[in-house]
Image (cartoon, rainbow, N blue to C red):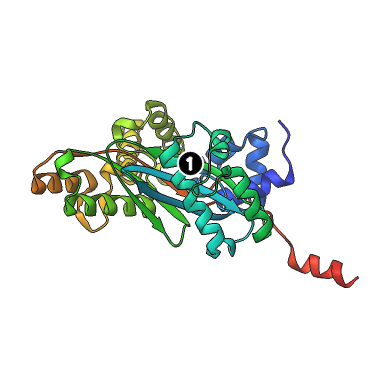
């Protein structure tokens, strides 16, 4: 499979590795991007692929709860100035309200819903905002929880939004300790972006792939040249166990007290308030994640203007 200069550039941005090494990796892997990332990691050239994609598009992520129903949305625009525009922010809040109250099946259904207080569809209101604000606006994604206890958290004016959903008895839903717990957990998800909820949710193929990758990397390390396979297996297993603690939410140290992990903190709060508490699910949106932003060369644009 052939690859282009853009592929080399993208691989460099994903891994932080030099252009020539990225080109070599793509050559060795016949243009396969994922395989090239793995090849660079095996060679010790890339520590890890920590980005799911370039975080580039503007706009905002937003989460809210209405009548006990949690909703989270991401609405994109062309510039970061729009996220501070009251018209845009109000539109995003209205979209979240529609998601909570109308439960649309997909984006087409959402756009066809009536926007609150307007007597017009979400799409029609969006088109009006585009004309007034002067930028392209688009709802990218949304989700909702209609059961359990949902608590929203919006970070840095909409750069990140998290909707935390807990399983908790009805008589404990209004407990301040439970609400505080849910907000703290949402803030932790926003800050640390766990890949999996707990170890039980980690696919076996993910663990095996990570193990083989780390084993190959260990064998490439000159310091391990004379170490037997069994020792390398132990080294890899130890590193993998530590890695799973970092990427599994339940195993992460609790941000406000790192002497306990998230699971232990939830159990302590549950004991204090006298009811069972568990994390049902959570959703984290970061504005523009995975969307490649248009890259403008300002000097080039200026040069074109003065010709």
Q: Name the one closer to the observer, 249 or 9.
A: 249
Q: Quadrant of the N terminus?
A: top right
Residue 104 horizontal/vertical position (percent) = 48, 34
Residue 285 horizontal/vertical position (percent) = 46, 47
Residue at screen point 40% across, 39% down: 144
Residue designated by label 1: 142
84 in relation to 226, above or below: below
Residue 130, quarter of the rendered image: bottom right
Residue 84 horizontal/vertical position (percent) = 53, 65
Q: Quadrant of the C terminus?
A: bottom right
SS for dot 1? strand
Q: Is residue 1 visible?
A: yes
Residue 175 horizontal/vertical position (percent) = 16, 50
Considering every residue shown, the one lying at the far bottom of the view is 306
Q: Is residue 291 visible?
A: no
Q: Is residue 27 left or right of residue 117?
A: right
Q: Is residue 99 left or right of residue 14?
A: left
Task: Categorize mark 1 by other alpha carbons within 10 Å: few (<14), some (14-19), many (20+).
Answer: many
Considering every residue shown, the one lying at the far top of the view is 204
Residue 257, quarter of the rendered image: bottom left
Q: Is residue 131 left or right of residue 278?
A: right
Q: Name the one closer to the observer, 102 or 196.
A: 102
Residue at screen point 45% across, 41% down: 99
Residue at screen point 80% across, 70% down: 302
């Amino acid at each position: 499979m052939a690859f282009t200069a853009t592929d080399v550039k993208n691989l460099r941005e994903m891994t932080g590795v030099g252009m020539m090494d990225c080109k070599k990796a793509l050559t060795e892997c016949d243009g396969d991007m994922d395989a090239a990332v793995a090849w660079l990691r095996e060679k010790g050239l890339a520590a890890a692929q920590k980005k799911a994609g370039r975080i580039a598009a503007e706009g905002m992520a937003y989460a809210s709860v209405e009548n006990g129903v949690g909703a989270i949305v991401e609405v994109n625009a062309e510039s970061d100035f729009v996220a501070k525009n009251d018209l845009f922010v109000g539109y995003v809040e209205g979209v979240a309200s529609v998601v909570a109250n109308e439960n649309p099946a997909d984006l087409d259904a959402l756009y066809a819903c009536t926007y609150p207080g307007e007597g017009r569809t979400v799409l029609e209101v969006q088109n009006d905002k585009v004309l007034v604000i002067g930028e392209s606006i688009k709802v990218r994604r949304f989700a909702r929880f209609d059961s359990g206890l949902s608590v929203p958290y919006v970070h840095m004016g909409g750069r990140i939004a998290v909707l935390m959903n807990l399983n908790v008895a009805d008589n404990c839903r209004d407990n301040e300790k439970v609400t505080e717990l849910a907000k703290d957990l949402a803030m932790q998800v926003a800050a640390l972006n766990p890949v999996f909820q707990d170890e039980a949710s980690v696919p076996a193929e993910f663990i095996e792939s990570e193990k083989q990758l780390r084993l190959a990397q260990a064998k490439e390390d000159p310091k391990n040249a004379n170490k037997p396979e069994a020792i390398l297996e132990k080294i890899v297993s130890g590193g993998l166990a530590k890695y799973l603690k970092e990427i599994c939410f339940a195993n992460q140290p609790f941000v406000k007290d790192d002497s306990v992990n998230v699971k232990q903190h939830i159990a302590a709060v549950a004991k204090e308030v006298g009811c069972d508490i568990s994390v049902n699910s959570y959703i984290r949106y970061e504005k523009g994640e995975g969307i490649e932003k248009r890259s403008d060369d300002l000097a080039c644009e200026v040069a074109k203007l003065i010709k």
